[in-house]
Image (spheres, rainbow, N blue to C red):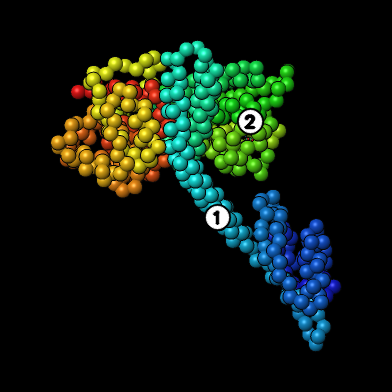
Amino acid sequence: MVAYWDADQRCRFANRAYEKWFGVDPRTLVGKEMRELLGPLYALNLPYIEGVLRGEAQEFEREIPDPAGGAPRHSLAQYIPDVVDGQVRGFYVLVTDITRLKRAERALREAEHQLESSARLDALATLAAGIAHEINNPLAAILAHTELALESLSGLPATSEALATDLREARNNTLRVRDIVRSMRLLARGEAKRDEQVDVSDTLRGSIELVQPSLRYRARVVRELGAGLYVRGNASQLAQVFVNLLSNAAQALPEQPGRANEIRVSTRREGDLIVSEVSDNGCGIPRELQERVFEPFFTTKGVGAGMGLGLSISKSIIEALGGALSVASEPGRGSVFRIVLPAAPAAAPQASKPFALPASPRTSTPSLAVARPRVLVIDDELAVARTLERILARDCDVVIKNHGQDALALLGNEQEPAFDLVLCDLMMPEPSGQAIYEKVHEQRPELAERFVFITGGAFTAKGRQFLESVPVAVLEKPFDLARLRAVVAAYATKA
Ligand code: ADP
């Protein structure tokens, strides 16, 4: 818009653009007062008008409503004084539409913000994985020694019952630490497994079952679960996500009898996507927090009630599966959490490791086919190696190697009697577990088949790729006695 206004703020000239911006014919404007044209904007612009009439050029930005009811335009206005012989006779007005510029600026700021929060999340995930890894070694030792002590006690007279109770309490709490560490590790991006064909509706049904005890008296659960909806992933991880969303939904609902508390769970196909939603008509989430709820350790729940990890873990699981988790919430009315995942074809062969580790046996250890199996433990952390030795020494001959080089020298020695099992840490200073395995695989393939990797779980992307590419089982720290012994037994009987 281009115009000229005199010192009495009356229009002397206005171009055609005024028609578009204000919906007025510029010819009828001549002689009109600025106050009349601007309406409510006049009061806002007054300081600039007074400024330019004092002879000072003005520049400012303003949002101007669209007379046709569309989105407002962003404008950059310039007032230039018309000074003759030191007297201000009037001023020129130049208004430029900068709407597109503003939009681009906002998009850029949002992208920047997203980048920042994703960088922050990455840093947190790395930190969490690092801490988890460090805690896992001493944790493995504590857990194993507690179990060993419990085992020794079981042969003693009943006077030691109080001691056994203390130890069991210690073990249960150690197991809690293990679970916390596990959930922290899941924060590390991309740790989601994609090895199964998962029936989403089935998984949702199972998850509802799991949280049913806390749902039953809180809310009516409405299900809209389609048939034949499959994604690639891991059923227990997906169930973890659903359980999380369901428990959050239940906690968002007030305990008011007679109120129509409702949790709606649905899943359906939309093109190539499977869309699942968990919605509630509970307290909702204030707008300014709707993005923050996905941040690790963000919680509005009291001490001990929530760690604030649920949604951030859920998000990283879903994103690692190539999907997205988002929320739409109306404060005071409820929330809808939505998961979108790529659909998988209905039937596909199940991938399986050539030799799967046995699950923890509930009963006693299986008897061994080999009288005393020989086990090699390779771990740079002496405490872990010693713990393994302490657990296995009862039934096996255990050899410990702390350095990858020493282990390789031993494994390369043809005079050395064969090992039934090689428990090898994956993350070690060079040569790493991977390097040791590759070397052995090249030189003595029959021995490579005896490898089981032990890990604290903090995989790099490369490490994960490697684990997926080899037929080697993985044992996670901290291990429990029964499972470890079952693994040894399985290898001792493996021809
Ligand atoms: P936690 O449940 O341990 O607090 P989450 O990451 O699962 O951790 O959730 C983070 C926060 O998001 C919660 O503390 C709560 O404020 C908010 N939230 C999550 N789900 C809902 C929901 N369905 N309704 C209202 N608020 C929710």
Hey, which residue is sitting farthest top in the picture?
Answer: 158
Q: Residues at badges 1 and 2 in contact (C-beta under 8 Å)? A: no
Q: Secondary structure at mark 2?
A: loop
Residue at the image point whose x is 71% and y is 61% from the top = 62
Q: Amino acid at mark 2?
A: Ala
From the image, state whether disc 1 or disc 2 is nearer to you. Answer: 2
Residue 142 at x, y percent in the picture? 46, 31
Residue type pointed to by label 1: Glu
SS assignment at label 1: helix
Depth check: 452 or 236 in front? 452
Q: Residue at x 59, y 61 (%)?
A: 101
Q: Residue furthest left?
A: 415
Q: Is mark 1 within 8 Å of ligand 1?
A: no
Compared across the picture, whether 203 is left or right of 5 comes to left
Coordinates of residue 397 in the picture (x, y in percent): 27, 28
Q: Is residue 455 above or below residue 395?
A: below
Q: Which residue is mark 1?
A: 112
Say whether residue 309 is visible: yes
**Residue drawn at (67%, 26%) of the image:** 253
* Disc 2 Cβ-to-ligand 1 distance below 8 Å: yes
